[in-house]
């Protein structure tokens, strides 16, 4: 019984440590895939235009017709698309969600 307890005491922390290390590597891989120079006009605006403007065209808050409005609301946009609450009646691909998230996390540049 004493040997079993000692065995568990040694093995368990090792397994937990290895598990944490794997999670860190996965997170780093996700960050490395984000291009900080992602283009608003070429990549982000077309996604917003095709998936959001049917509702957010000045008639419903937030108005997402302009760069300025999209930038001001970027954190809310990020939250809504990551939780998949938006767009209502449609869906974004994982690549589109990652592109918008990357653009926001990279400073929401008007490029």
Image (cartoon, rainbow, N blue to C red):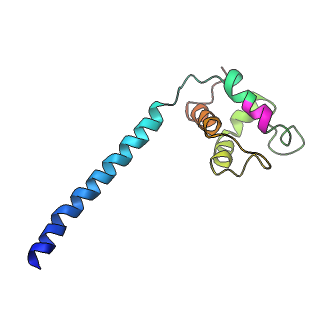
- From the viewer's perspective, is 107 left or right of 28? right
Instruction: Residue 7: give x, y in percent of width and height.
Output: 14, 67
Residue at x 64% of width, y 22% of height: 39
- From the viewer's perspective, is 53 left or right of 32? right
- On the image, which quarter does residue 15 sit in? bottom left
- Hey, which residue is sitting farthest bottom in the picture? 1
- On the image, which quarter does residue 108 sit in? top right
Q: Nearer the viewer, residue 102 or 67?
A: 102
Residue at x 60% of width, y 31% of height: 103
Q: Nearer the viewer, residue 75 or 102?
A: 102
Q: Quadrant of the C terminus?
A: top right
Q: Quadrant of the N terminus?
A: bottom left
Q: Is residue 20 above or below residue 92?
A: below
Q: Is residue 111 above or below residue 58?
A: above
- Tell me which secondary structure the magenta stretch mostly adopts: helix
- From the viewer's perspective, is 29 left or right of 87? left
Q: Is residue 39 above or below residue 74?
A: above
Instruction: Residue 18: give x, y in percent of width and height.
Output: 27, 51
Q: Nearer the viewer, residue 21 or 80?
A: 21
Residue at x 79% of width, y 32% of height: 49
Residue at x 82% of width, y 39% of height: 63
Q: Nearer the viewer, residue 75 or 10?
A: 10
Residue 102 colored in magenta in the image: no
Disc count in the image? 0
Q: Where are the magenta residues, as a range? A: 47-51
- From the viewer's perspective, is 36 left or right of 60? left
- Hey, which residue is sitting farthest left in the picture? 3
Instruction: Residue 105: give x, y in percent of width and height.
Output: 56, 35
Instruction: Residue 26: give x, y in percent of width and height.
Output: 41, 42
């Amino acid at each position: 019984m004493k040997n079993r307890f000692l065995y568990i005491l040694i093995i368990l922390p090792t397994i937990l440590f290895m598990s944490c290390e794997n999670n860190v590597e996965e997170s780093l891989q996700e960050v490395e895939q984000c291009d900080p120079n992602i283009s608003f006009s070429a990549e982000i605006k077309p996604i917003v235009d095709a998936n959001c403007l049917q509702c957010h065209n000045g008639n419903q808050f937030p108005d997402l017709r302009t760069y300025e409005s999209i930038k001001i609301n970027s954190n809310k946009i990020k939250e809504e698309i990551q939780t998949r609450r938006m767009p209502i009646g449609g869906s974004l691909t994982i690549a589109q969600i990652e592109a918008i998230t990357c653009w926001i996390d990279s400073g929401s540049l008007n490029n």
